[in-house]
Amino acid sequence: MRAYLVRRLLALVPTLFFASLIVFSTVRMIPGDIIDMMIAQNDIGSKVSRQALEAALGLDQPMFTQYLAWVSGILLHGDFGKSLWQQSPVLEEILTRIPVTFELGIMALIVALTVAIPIGVISALRQDSWGDYIGRSFSILMLAVPGFWMGTMVMVFPSIWWGISPEVKFVPFHEDPWGNFIQMAIPAVILGTSLSAVTMRMTRTMMLEVLRQDYIRTAWAKGQNERGVVIRHALRNALIPVVTLIGLQAPILIGGAVIMEQIFVIPGMGLLLLEAVSRRDYPVITAVFLIVGVAVVLINLLVDLSYGLLDPKVRFR
Amino acid sequence: MALLSVRGLTTRFRTDRGALTAVDDVSFDLDEGETLAIVGESGSGKSVTALSLMRLIAQPAGQIVAGSAMFEGKDLLSLPEEEMRSVRGDRIAMIFQEPMTSLNPSISVGAQVGEPMVLHRGSTWQAAMAKAGELLDRVRLPDARARVNAYPHQFSGGQRQRAMIAMALACQPRLIIADEPTTALDVTVQAQILALLKELTRETGAALILITHDLGVVARYADRVAVMYGGRMVETASARALYRTPRHPYTEGLLASIPRLDQVAGRRLIPIEGQPPDLTRLPPGCAFRPRCRRATAACETTRPALAEAAPGHWKACLNDAA
């Protein structure tokens, strides 16, 4: 088990190396670089030359040199660089944002699973009943309706109809947990239900598959009731592929969080990233991407480890 | 008085190719401690008969449409589902054909073997696991007590079937139904498992319904035999009488088609010609008529009923020969 963990964590190294290369070079390919923005925004074109600005920000160096400086800063000093606009350390900014996005992601995941698994199970148990049709239609609807559209509608229509709108000023968790929960609930529900669609379909399919197995007949034959058959004998076996799916959805979850943060003005990693991209703040963009990369890899590691709990045939070597 | 008394059991299935009667008007009695073998080819209705008694027919495709099955004063076929649940695994236990897939892969063997104790005896899981160790020991699983926490994939096919038998014995049922318990096992293991099953039913006094297509098994382990063909019971007699004087042409054919050690050297085995009947397209008369050597004109129109040909020996055939 330990050897397995070490190997999995070592595998992070090449993954992150390639990710860093791609991220570092692609952000610099976005048309319109930071110098154009600074000059346009501050109307300083007449006072400062382009070359002087590039030199001041260290952007005059060859890209390879810049990359080496950036990577060695991370590896040697844990320094992700400074924001090119605020000159504040990127890592500090990110560390204040991670918990917000993490909270949103966890809440969305909880919503997704509490919606998906019961509906999936009931849909399978009552196959081709009205409940099944309603559950499946709901899931297709959630799959078809984009989260950003839902988010926008939820922002706009209540304010038109009833004159209420969600709090735009962010309430941090440590100041007012309940207020924070209320604020996060709407984006989490929207994000969660759109994630739940695929999970629900997978749960339903797997349940139908498992319920046909011989050992389910054995469970009935020993006098189990429906509840015991489903919860004790079927669900665990049906959930193994569902867990894989949840791991695969991690990037979608993070991508969705970026959009929700933008719509509901939640100061998480997503909002930070969007702002950074629109201002070409290279160190911030690369750092956010790198951390998201680490998160996705770790989530999938957690998923793989959870197989050990669900499936006794899995041994980590 | 019989432990189990089945009368007119009829089970129908709706399939894509039309409705079929998998079990048609089957009746039999089973005494306390008796072993009844139900013999027939695949599709003859023997498994469906067993599943019908347990009320485990896949609904809504399958329906028990007629009949009664009196067991300990209750009709199994009309019992409310909740009462039926308290019969399953407690008074009647069932062992299935496929030991490889009949155990839950994600639950430890001990927890599966002990589960009926928790369901029917209100036992704690801890006590059930201890009892499971005893039961596994009793079915001669090597190193039983240490292996209650093992999972099915760590067991061989024969060991899994032993675990299934242990599970069946958990609540000391009065009736065990074993549906081809050895078909999926190696020949050497088959004999061990059957001997074990027979020995344990003798010890506990449980009656046994042994479903099989193997007449060799029947001769050794059954007191009485019921032969099924096309969903109907065509002959029933004591095992001895059935072997000595088979009275239905189908049974004769079955016996003639199996090799025997005491037969004259060089005698050829005689196969039964033709195919088992398509249950969705049964002919109007006797279902066996297209394959029967002795069929007459009457066989085409009249469906023979089970009638007593000799004391305790019943057959469903219009012909009086043999």
Image (cartoon, rainbow, N blue to C red):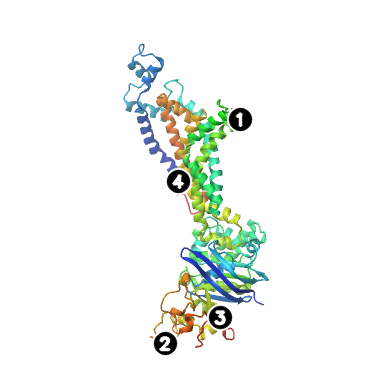
Closer to the chain start, of discs 2 and 3, is 2
Task: Point out residue A227 in the picture as x, y percentages from the top left corner.
Answer: 60, 54
Q: Position of residue B190 (x, y in %)?
A: 49, 71
Q: Secondary structure at mark 2?
A: loop
In the displayed structure image, the side of residue B311 where residue A50 appears, left or right? left
Q: Quickly name the residue at label 3.
A: B306
- Local packing at callout 4 (Cα closer than 10 Å; few below 14, some 14-19, many 20+) is few
Left or right placement of residue B54 versus residue A144 in this view: right
Could you say which is closer to the camera, residue B55 or residue B96?
Answer: B55
Report the disc number at residue A4. Answer: 4
Q: Nearer the viewer, residue B321 or B280?
A: B280
Label 3 sits on a secondary structure element that is loop
- For the residues labelled 4 and 3, the Cα–Cα distance comes to 67 Å
Q: Amino acid at mark 2?
A: Val
Q: Residues within 10 Å of mark 2 (few under 14, many from 20)?
A: few
Residue B95: name its quadrant.
Answer: bottom right
